[in-house]
Each structure stands twice: as C-alpha cells, then as structure tokens.
Image (cartoon, coloured by chain):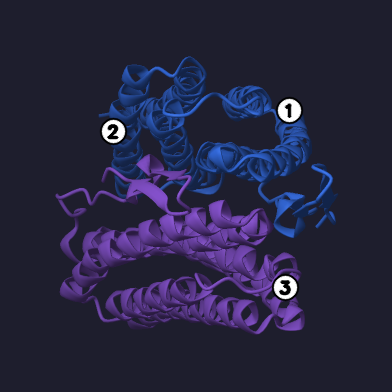
Chain colours: A purple, B blue
C-alpha cells in the first residue's frame, strides 16, 4: 500500500467517524421531536417507539468508540486529527445522553395521559422545540467547524433556562391550586427538566467544537444552571400564589 | 534517553492519570456527603462551599483531558495502555457530572430551609449514603481492576432505584396532603432524582472498569431507569392517597 493510500484510508475513517456523529445527533433530534409529539397527542404507541429507537443511539455510541480506539491504535494520529478523534469520543457520549433524556420524556406519556391536560404543557412543548433547534445548530457547527455558530448555541441556552424557570413556577402554582394536578404537574416538571438538561448538553458539544477548531476550550465558563433551584412558591389564602425566585 | 527511561516516563504519566481520576472521585464522594449534610442541617454556608469546590472537579477533568491527549500524541500507546487512556477520558467526564449533581443537591438547601422540614428528607439522606458508597466502591474497583466489585456496584443500583421510586410516591402524597408542602417536596424530589442519577453514573464507571479489564463492555445492558416515570398518585376524598405504579 502506498503512503497516499494510507492517508486516504485514514481520511475515510475520520469521515466515517464524523458521519456517524452527525447521524447520531440527527437521530437524537428526531427522538426529542417524537417524544414531545407523543406527549402532546397522548400517543403511548409513539412514546414506546421512542424508547425502542433509543437502542440505535446507544449502538452508534459503541460504533464511535470502537472506531475511535482503532484509529488511535492503528493510525497514531497527531495534532488536529487527534483532537478530532477525542472530540468524537466526547461528543458521542453527550449525544447518547441526549437520547436518554428524550426517552425519559417519552416515558412519561403514559402517566400524563391518565390525567386531564394542564395548560403548561404548551410552554413545555415550546421548550422542546428550542432544545431541538439547538441540537440541529450545534451539529451543523460541528460538521462545518463553525465556531461562531457554536457560540450562538451556547448563548441560546439562556433562553432555555429562563423559559424552564418560568415553567417551574407555573407548574408549582397549578399544583397548589388543585391537588389533582400534582401527579401530572410533577411528571411535566421532570419533562421540562430533561429538556433543560438537553440544552446544557448542546452547549457542551458547542465547547467541543470550539476545542476542535481552536485547540482550546472557550475561556468564559457559561453558567449552566437554571434559576429554579432557588425558586420558592407559596400558596396564599386568597387563592393567588406568592412567587419568589432568586436568579443563580 | 534510554528506552527504559521512556517506558518509565510513560508509566509515571499513566499512574498520574489514574491518580487524578481517583482523587477526582474521592472529591465527588465528599461533595455528595457535604451536600446531604448541608441539606439536613439547613446549613447554607456549607452548601455554598460545595458549589465553590465543584470548580476543582471541573479543573481536574481538564487536567485528565490534557494529560490523556498528550499521552496519546507523544506515546502512541497500544492495547491495554490505550484502553486505560480512553477509559480515563470517559471516567473523568462521568465524575465531573457526578460533581454537578452534588452541587445541584447543595443548591436546593436555601429554598428548602425556608420551609418546615418534611419527614421524607430522611430516606433522601439514606439514598445519598447509598450513592456515596457506590462512588467509593466503584473507584476502588477502578484502581484495583476488580471486575467483580464493579459488577456488585451495578447490582446495587437496583436498591437506589427502588428507594427513589418509594421516595417519589411519598413526596407526592405529602404534597397532596398540604399545599404548603409543595415547594419543599418538589425541591426534595429533584434532590432525590439527582442522587438517583449519581447511582446510574457509578454503574457507567463500573462498565468502564469491565472494559478496562476485559477489553469489552458487559453483555447484559442494565436497565437504568427507575420505575417512577410511570408512577401515578391520586388524592382521595378520604384523605388517603391512591398510589399506582407500574415498574418499567
């Protein structure tokens, strides 16, 4: 085999690695969209399909791991190729986790379908769409090595955090209004939290894109916590609610 | 430099990598213990210290990443050494996340301290101790390459899932009994969920230990979901609660 052939084989394998990552990410994005759709339509069958399809994402993570390890062992890459492989390893682990969160969203369809719908399901669906766009954009930035686009994804996570905190408050007031809302609002709260975590994970991918292109992680550590950990809501005798939240 | 020297330098760096992982893990274990302690004692100062100390875990993850990448680039390791480096990369990312969960537990101390304590805080603290032991044992298994011990950690996660699901139900009934419990019980629910996720993450480290020693991941995919996603609790007019939960 000539040296040209070796270089070409290596490039092909690197491309396959990136292609698998992009495909995994696309699948995770679809999984989230399907999970939200199942939730809105109370479609337990669709929710079950999301859980089944998650296995494919897990398998793809193993494929990435194996390919990355064999590339490291056989090709002994340096500099930017080495960075590309390490980034692929880290990114596939993050996408696998995004898949898990989408699966968990879908799983709550059954419990939620046993109760009348509560209005906050609409902002929860909006939160899902925001996170979905972030997954799409961060993958685009990964494939096209676009640091600026990756940076915009990190910025947009603030929007997700703000909406999540407002959903948190809204759900608590619904619970206080009527005890029959408690179970469904609790499940919706976890759905919203899962989506908020997906937003955080897309920012981690964005940081990997930064590392991939610039050779270092972004200097400004984004604050990835939403403000809800500090939020306090109290029932009031007048039927309204006293809401108090300190941003983190 | 003789070849013996090169080998020794490589071994030293590999040892440093493992030492950093073990230290990171020990820190995450302490963080979880301190977070639970702050919660029980309503000690906001201690909770704030947990949040500050988390930065150290994040820094250590970067150290592991840099050391791993330089080992890959300069030493071009093969076989079991390559596995050790890839495992270190994956394990440090998991420990970083365990640290985040501990920090999030601590952060809810302020909101929880504004309300009278609710009895389920005790099983939540027990859940925390279980997860803490799992972190300790899985790190021991990592350092000593003990697959059997790692396997036992994976087994023990069932205990965490079962206790978490029972806490989930208990908290929902407290919310239904008195609307003034809703905010504190919601925060406790997230605390419990964070700890349950820590349990899941220790099983991921256990799987890495399996890969490290045996060169492949365990064949039986452990079901990492708790049963709470399907759990339904309804308030009843008699003051009791109808609880229904289907295991996943």
Q: Is residue B170 visible?
A: yes
The residue lying toward the viewer, choosing from A70 and A134, is A134
Element at label 1: helix
Q: Pick the quarter of the image with the C terminus of chain A.
A: top left
Q: Work out how far the residue at label 1 is from the one at label 2, CA to CA, in angstroms.
A: 30 Å
Element at label 2: helix
The chain that hosts pointer 1 is B
User: Where A53 falls versus B235 (above or below)?
Assistant: below
Q: Pick the quarter of the image with the N terminus of chain A.
A: bottom left
Task: Return the mark for residue B170.
Answer: none
Image coordinates of residue B183 in percent, x first then y, are 50, 42
Q: Which picture quadrant has residue B47? A: top left
The residue lying toward the viewer, choosing from B143 and B78, is B143
- Write down the residue under mark 1: B149
Q: Earlier in the sequence, mark 1 or mark 2?
A: 2
Rendered residue at 55%/63% (across/down)? A191
- Write down the residue under mark 3: A113
Mark 3 near mark 2, Cβ–Cβ under 8 Å? no
Q: Which picture quadrant has residue A177? A: bottom right
Say whether residue A164 is left or right of residue A107: left
Between tags 1 and 2, which lies in front?
A: 2
* Number of other residues with Cα within 10 Å of mark 1, as a class: few under 14, some 14 to 19, many 20 or more: some
Between tags 3 and 2, which lies in front?
A: 3
């Amino acid at each position: 085999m000539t040296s040209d052939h070796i270089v070409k084989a290596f490039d092909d394998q690197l491309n396959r690695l990136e292609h698998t990552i992009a495909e995994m990410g696309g699948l995770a994005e679809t999984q989230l969209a399907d999970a939200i759709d199942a939730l809105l339509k109370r479609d337990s069958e669709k929710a079950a399909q999301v859980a089944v399809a998650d296995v494919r994402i897990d398998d793809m993570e193993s494929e990435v791991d194996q390919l990355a390890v064999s590339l490291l062992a056989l090709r002994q890459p340096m500099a930017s190729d080495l960075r590309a492989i390490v980034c692929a390893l880290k990114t596939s682990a993050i996408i696998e986790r995004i898949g898990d969160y989408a699966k968990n969203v879908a799983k709550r369809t059954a419990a939620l379908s046993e109760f009348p719908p509560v209005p906050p399901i609409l902002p929860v669906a909006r939160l899902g769409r925001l996170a979905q766009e972030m997954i799409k954009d961060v993958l685009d930035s990964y494939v096209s090595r676009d640091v600026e686009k990756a940076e915009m994804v990190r910025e947009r996570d603030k929007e997700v955090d703000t909406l999540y905190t407002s959903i948190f408050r809204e759900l608590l007031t619904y619970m206080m209004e009527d005890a029959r809302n408690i179970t469904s609002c609790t499940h919706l709260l976890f759905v919203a939290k899962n989506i908020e975590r997906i937003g955080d994970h897309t920012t981690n991918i964005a940081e990997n894109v930064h590392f991939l292109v610039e050779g270092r992680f972004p200097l400004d550590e984004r604050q990835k916590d939403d403000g809800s950990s500090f939020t306090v809501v109290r029932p009031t005798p007048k039927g309204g609610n006293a809401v108090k939240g300190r941003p983190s």
